[in-house]
Amino acid sequence: MELSQDTKNILGLQLPTDPRWVNLAELSLAEILTDHAYCEQKAATTCISLIQRYSDREAMVAALAPIVTEEWGHFRLVLAELHKRNLKLGKQRKDEYVNALIDFQRKGGHLEDRFLDQLLTMALIEARSCERFKRLSEGLNDAYMQKFYRRFMESEAGHYTLFIDLAETYIDKEKVRQRWKEWLEFEAEIIRHLEVRGDRIH
């Protein structure tokens, strides 16, 4: 499976989404919308958690405060789309992808290393979400939903770069780049081994 240049150069992801995923997602739109809603909700709450935990890092707090508002706005947009289709917000599922990323985070050692991994986890989630939204914006047969997901794709691309920039604001750039390379390689292995399912964003 060849990795498209836009995915590799812009997002850095080492492995593209399986092309079958979009077709499966189109058959499970209610589930995809529910999962998408929870993804946006968790993005907002994670940013709040980072602000609370590292409140002394003023540049990060200032950068993430509007992201909280934006992510929560995204949650409301997806919720409105569910209601418009007479669909209910389903149950939140276990996120195997995100849980695998969290397991890779360094838990002990220096605070700086833990902080870096938390930021890079968010960067990866945003990058993969952007890539998935791009697939939906190009691969769905419904023109309205293509436009709907293009809007999210553009937003997530900006979020991905923000978390990388924040890491480089507080931590040596070479250290950030080396750890980012390790994260990208690990994330590719997650994608390689996860079951391809159309009822989830990741």
Image (cartoon, grey):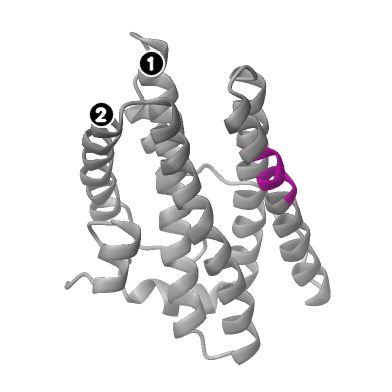
Give the residue drawn at x 29%, y 53%: 191
Classify mark 2: helix, strand or loop: helix
Please state which of residues 75 and 157 is positioned toward the viewer in this rendering.
157
In this figure, which residue is indicated by the disc labeled 2? Answer: 175
**Residue 145 location, x and y as percent?**
62, 82
Quarter of the figure with residue 81: bottom right
At label 2, which amino acid type do we have?
Lys
Whether residue 16 is visible here, answered yes or no, is no
Task: Tell me which secondary structure the magenta stretch mostly adopts.
Answer: helix
At label 1, which amino acid type do we have?
Lys
Quarter of the figure with residue 10: bottom left
**Residue 77 location, x and y as percent?**
75, 64
2 or 1: mark nearer the eye = 2
Please state which of residues 80 and 182 is positioned toward the viewer in this rendering.
182
Classify mark 1: helix, strand or loop: loop
Which residue is the extreme one toward the left? 2
Label 2 vs 1, first from the N-terminus: 1
Q: Is residue 167 above or below residue 106?
A: below
Residue 65 magenta: yes
Q: Are marks 2 and 1 in contact (CB under 8 Å)?
A: no
* Residue range (magenta): 64-69
Which residue is the extreme one toward the top? 109
**Residue 85 location, x and y as percent?**
78, 77
Q: Is residue 28 above or below residue 14?
A: below
In this figure, which residue is indicated by the disc labeled 1? Answer: 107
Give the residue drawn at x 58%, y 62%: 155
Q: Is residue 48 above or below residue 85?
A: above
